[in-house]
Image (spheres, grey):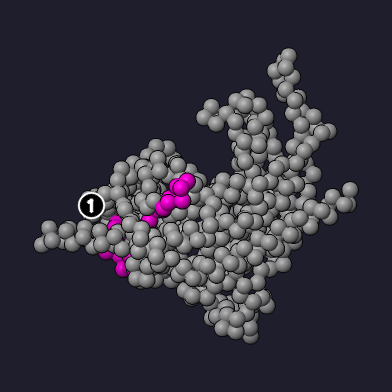
Amino acid sequence: MMEVCGSSNVTLREFGCEQSLLSRPDGSASFVQGDTSVMAGVYGPAEVKVSKEIYDRATLEVLIQPKVGLPSVRERSQEQCVRETCEAALQLSLHPRSSLTLILQLLHDDGSLLSCYLNAACMALMDAGLPMNCLFCGVTCAINKEGEIITDPTAAQEKESRALMTFAIDSTERRVMMSSTKGSFSVHEMQRCIAVSQKASEKIFQFYRDSVRRRYSKTL
Amino acid sequence: MAAGFKTAEPLEYHRSFLKENCRPDGRELFDFRTTTLNIGSISTADGSALVKMGNTTIICGIKAELANPTVEAPDKGYIVPNVDLPPLCSSRFRPGPPGEQAQAASQFIADVIESSEVIKTEDLCIERGKLCWVLYCDMMCLDYDGNILDACIIALLAALKNTQLPEITINQETCTPEVNLEKRHGLHIHKHPVGASFCVFDHSILIVDPTAEEEVLSTAQLTVVTDEEDRLCSVHKPGGTSLSGEKLQECISRATVRQREIQKLIDKVILSVKTMH
């Protein structure tokens, strides 16, 4: 597992991020990975509907809006993945009986969409100033027909791959918070992908750090 | 006394058992509940199976219909899975359109079918570009006591193995399909995917096959699906507390053992049904 870490060079597409670009939400961010682009908005902590109230923590709701049409079953499943990842990262018990709403608007999909949703979500939560246990980032790995691992694949690379895995990695221990896979693969391949994702996560967390630093150096 | 403790402090109640490496229902941490399987339970469906894991009960019915293949994939049929969690099975589900859990479960089952290639959609094609089969796989939960994903996969696999499709001949003169209900044949099952679900307690303790109560109290859930060649078809962890690679490896090892057990169970049940006739 370790030698793979050393030899493989993790390449990611050009990343971009802008925070606080919307005026109405309490936190907002847009995240760009190559041509994949997602906008995120966070509202809350606000009043919660009685039916959704949880007595000892805040209720988090995640809504994913596709480019056209209504959200389908696929979006529901992605919503579940993003929500449960955010729930683990956020300190929800600090805001009991309140609601948090995270809206993710797809702007353009060119592969690695779920990881882009996760990254946009994390940046928006950070912008909203919500207390968190750790940060998280999403990394998508595709295994192509030759058995090579491609990190942050484009839609075309995703289509040609025989397996596709998306992991959410936490910032404190670099462990797997979320995992969602497609296609069949061996145990060894998965362990390799996790190792590569952990390596890629360091780059992404560095990018988080840089973009937040840039933002605050501007306002000062 | 114990009942009061359980109601007032459910988490502490479970912790006191986990400390002793066992669970309130007497199982060890990596034990599954007793799994029972009945196939051909619905006589009006083309294939069906009923699975019970402890109290969790899932019934799966498969209905085959004729349809036209899409223009993009003229040599492929369709498989349409659907998981239904009616208000009957638990108080946590309300009547009305399917909730998030039901939709996420349906999507998960669809992903498992696609990833594992349990059935190749090419096998469902009758005449290229003209006629194919659609398999509607409806899984309904009758009793919700946790871990429905594992139960759904077993029910689906057993029902698919039980499915008998009628023979279709296309009348060359009228160009209409003729169904011969007398002559039926089984589906070709390429792979046998079986799932194993885990819960994480207190960020570190792993337990297998959680009950509904354990699911609520856990901090993360994980489902691993493997086939008979030990390839992973899905490692689904929709969030929650993070896990290290070593812990994941433990789960995968347990899942491969489970795959053998369930495949043996399904084969045994199918054989017993055959010898009865």
User: Is residue A203 in the magenta section?
Assistant: no
* Residue that mark 1 sits on: A18
Q: Is residue B40 visible?
A: yes
Residue closest to the eye, A162 or A59? A162
Q: Is the residue marked by circle 1 packed among few (<14), some (14-19), or many (20+) residues within 10 Å?
A: some
Specify the farthest residue to the right: B277
Percent x, y of residue A7: 35, 60
**Residue at x 37%, y 63% (from the top left corner):** A5
User: Is residue A131 in the magenta section?
Assistant: yes
Residue closest to the eye, B253 or B78? B253
Q: Is residue A88 visible?
A: no
Percent x, y of residue B85: 61, 53
Image quarter where the C terminus of chain A lies is bottom left
Does residue B216 appear to the left or right of A207 in the view shown? right
Does residue B188 appear to the left or right of B94 in the view shown? right
Count the marks: 1
B176 above or below A216?
above
Percent x, y of residue A196: 38, 60
Q: Amino acid at mark 1?
A: Glu
Q: Which residues are magenta?
A: A122-149
